[in-house]
Image (cartoon, rainbow, N blue to C red):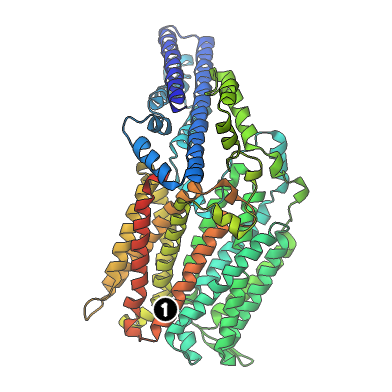
């Protein structure tokens, strides 16, 4: 089959190159004897070649995807080691036919020649009409953009928007193939409802991190140790482990009701957090944070984008989801640094410890009012039934179109019939059979869909979230103990760390990810993160601000790069059945990250019993061990990451 693909690819690209060469001769004649009608015909001829090239690229992409699915089938039937050997011995070999299919060797020359000729012809079209022979300004031919998009998809290169959008683990499926499906998507989409979901994401992240700079002081004011801030911060994550599941299930029936419930619970949680100071109750403080965690509607926000936003703008919406989270993470500590007032109103105390709770309570109350008047529940009667969307049939239509444009498919019906049992196995594949396209209906079925590669990526996600939570949650205690930083200094430090998210992702998504493979970036960023953790240890009698800040920047930036690459790979290696339903890939990654935060915050509180002076090194040891373990696991599954 691979040989058929390669030979067909070489044959078709040769035919396209021959057509381009003939058109180049016509173009040379027209340059000597300009003719307006001839120029128009020549440009249309180039455009026809461009359309056929796009069909060829799509055809190769479909078959490359088919090869990957077959490898997954062997993974399931015969075990991971067989596939690992196959990929290692064939895909990585310099003369491998499989490598030629994945990398489309030779097509790049045809793409470049056609794009250059179309662009030059488009730019010079005005010169044939001008007595001064000056080129007029012209728009770039849309065929060029279509070709570039097809090449990007086939080479799996990326850009900032796509790279950022992948952080949300929202699958960017192909646009609807029919006008009817497009109309259905437009009926479900409501811009203000999307904005409300993004605002919910932003406010929740602000709510999560606004207490980090003051949680230790708040704990001390209630008679507890400063390291109890780990429990205070982590209690929100504990509740989120459970809330993510029921919100994901609730979103199968409604989006409006869970958002209303979330806002009310978050309002009550922040009120409890604020009044705990006057009540002198650590229990009320923790209950308030638990309520805030129970109001986590990130699963609803993600599901709304996945189900109700049209495919043509879904990637932008996914990027907006990630951007809102990043901005909320940066704005939370920054806002805490501004809330430095102290006053009383009717025996209610307002200070740097309680103001974060009161401010967020007011914010959620205003959001609740806005939500009640502006949110539009999508009409679920218009949703397309998954059972009627047979991807296999969709691919047959595409291949049929390609047959009309290019000649023939790789495998004919007669050849398929001769394969007998092999065909039945492929039909039973989780990617091909209609029943197996249904989403996972339980945690057990979702777990069975996790291949070794997916499990390793979830381990990496757990590791990076653990390292980041250790760094952020204990920052106020560590900096106060070693450097005597006040709340404002800690808030500025955390805000600067949070603001690095978008610039770092912009650089990685725009440049670095186009220069290196995701799995290469994955390995390098893990090693860099390990270096940052090692550099954070206190090994001498003194611990300087420079060492702490530098190691924190290395750790945080490496974790951010790692998160983007990790989720990009996770979306590639994860089964399509985990792209929708209650137990989807987004929920699994959320649970892994939330569990990491819980474990990290509990580690901080437990280590605090040994003394603040030992807190730093004790909490860094698990990060070091987990990071080293994830690097080892990545090395073992390296050849299965595509």
Q: Is residue 185 above or below residue 556?
A: above
**Depth check, front residue: 39 or 189:** 189
Looking at the rendered image, the quarter that the C terminus falls into is top left
Would you identify the image quadrant in which residue 385 lies?
A: top right
The residue sitting at 55% across, 57% down in the picture is 447
Residue 185 visible at all:
no
Q: Is residue 312 left or right of residue 614?
A: right
- How far across and how far down the image is residue 422, in percent? 55, 32
Q: Is residue 506 above or below residue 423?
A: below
Instruction: Look at the numbered disc 1 and give the secondary structure of its residue.
Output: helix
**Depth check, front residue: 618 or 634:** 634
Would you identify the image quadrant in which residue 465 lies?
A: bottom left
Would you identify the image quadrant in which residue 343 lies?
A: bottom right
- How far across and how far down the image is residue 510, in percent? 41, 46
**Depth check, front residue: 6 or 103:** 6
Q: Is residue 13 above or below residue 285?
A: above
How crowded pointer 1 is (Cα within 10 Å; few <14, some 14-19, many 20+) is rated as many
The residue sitting at 59% across, 48% down in the picture is 577
The residue sitting at 58% across, 69% down in the picture is 240
- How far across and how far down the image is residue 69, in percent? 51, 39
The residue sitting at 37% across, 56% down in the picture is 633
**Residue picked out by circle 1:** 604
- Number of numbered discs: 1
Residue 386 visible at all:
yes
- How far across and how far down the image is residue 550, in percent? 29, 67
């Amino acid at each position: 089959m691979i040989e058929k693909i390669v030979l067909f690819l070489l044959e078709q690209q040769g035919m396209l190159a021959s057509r381009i060469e003939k058109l180049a001769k016509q173009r040379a004649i027209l340059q000597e004897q300009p003719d307006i009608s001839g120029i128009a015909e020549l440009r249309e001829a180039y455009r026809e070649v461009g359309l056929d090239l796009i069909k060829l690229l799509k055809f190769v992409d479909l078959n490359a995807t088919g090869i990957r699915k077959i490898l997954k089938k062997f993974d399931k039937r015969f075990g991971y080691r067989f596939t690992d050997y196959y990929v290692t011995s064939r895909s990585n070999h310099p003369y491998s036919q499989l490598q030629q299919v994945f990398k489309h060797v030779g097509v790049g020359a045809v793409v470049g020649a056609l794009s250059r000729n179309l662009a030059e012809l488009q730019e010079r079209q005005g010169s044939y009409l001008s007595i001064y022979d000056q080129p007029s300004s012209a728009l770039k031919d849309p065929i060029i953009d279509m070709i570039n998009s097809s090449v990007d998809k086939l080479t799996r290169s990326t850009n900032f928007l796509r790279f950022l959008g992948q952080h949300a683990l929202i699958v960017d499926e192909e646009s609807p193939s029919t006008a009817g499906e497009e109309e259905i998507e437009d009926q479900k989409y409501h811009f203000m409802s999307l904005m409300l979901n993004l605002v919910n994401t932003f406010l929740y992240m602000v709510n999560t991190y606004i207490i980090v700079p003051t949680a230790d002081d708040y704990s001390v004011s209630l008679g507890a140790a400063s390291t109890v801030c780990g429990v205070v911060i982590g209690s929100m994550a504990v509740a989120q482990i459970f809330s993510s599941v029921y919100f994901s299930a609730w979103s199968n029936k409604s989006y409006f009701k869970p958002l209303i419930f979330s806002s009310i619970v978050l309002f009550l949680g922040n009120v409890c957090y604020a009044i705990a100071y006057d009540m002198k109750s650590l229990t009320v403080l923790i209950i308030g944070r638990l309520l805030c965690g129970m109001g986590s509607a990130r699963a609803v926000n993600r599901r709304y984008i996945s189900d109700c936003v049209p495919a043509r703008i879904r990637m932008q919406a996914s990027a907006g989801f990630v951007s809102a989270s990043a901005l909320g993470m940066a704005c939370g500590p920054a806002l805490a640094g501004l809330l430095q007032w102290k006053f009383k109103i009717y025996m209610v105390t307002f200070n740097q410890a309680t103001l974060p709770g009161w401010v967020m309570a007011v914010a959620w109350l205003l959001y609740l009012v806005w939500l009640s008047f502006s949110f539009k529940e999508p009409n679920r009667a218009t949703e397309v039934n998954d059972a009627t969307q047979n991807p296999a049939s969709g691919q047959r239509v595409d291949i049929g179109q390609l047959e009309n444009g290019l000649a023939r498919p790789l495998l004919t019906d007669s050849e398929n019939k001769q394969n007998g049992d092999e065909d039945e196995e492929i039909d039973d594949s989780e990617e091909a059979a209609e029943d197996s396209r249904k989403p996972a209906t339980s945690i057990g079925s979702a777990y069975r869909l996790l291949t070794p590669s997916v499990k390793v990526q979830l381990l990496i996600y757990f590791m990076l979230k653990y390292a980041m939570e250790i760094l952020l949650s204990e920052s106020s205690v560590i900096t106060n103990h070693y450097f005597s930083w006040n709340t404002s200094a800690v808030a500025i430090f955390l805000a600067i760390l949070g603001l690095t998210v978008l610039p770092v992702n912009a650089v990685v998504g725009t440049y670095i990810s186009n220069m290196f493979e995701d799995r290469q970036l994955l390995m390098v960023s893990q090693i860099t993160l390990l270096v940052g953790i090692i550099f954070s240890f206190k090994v001498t009698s003194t611990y300087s601000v420079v060492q702490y800040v530098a190691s924190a920047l290395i750790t945080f930036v490496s974790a951010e790069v790692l998160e983007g690459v990790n989720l990009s790979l996770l979306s590639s290696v994860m089964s399509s059945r985990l792209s929708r339903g209650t137990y989807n890939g987004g929920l699994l990654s959320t649970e892994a990250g939330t569990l990491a935060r819980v474990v990290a915050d509990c580690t901080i509180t437990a280590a605090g019993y040994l003394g603040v002076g030992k807190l730093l090194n004790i909490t860094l040891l698990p990060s070091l061990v987990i990071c080293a373990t994830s690097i080892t696991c990545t090395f073992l599954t390296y050849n299965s990451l595509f």
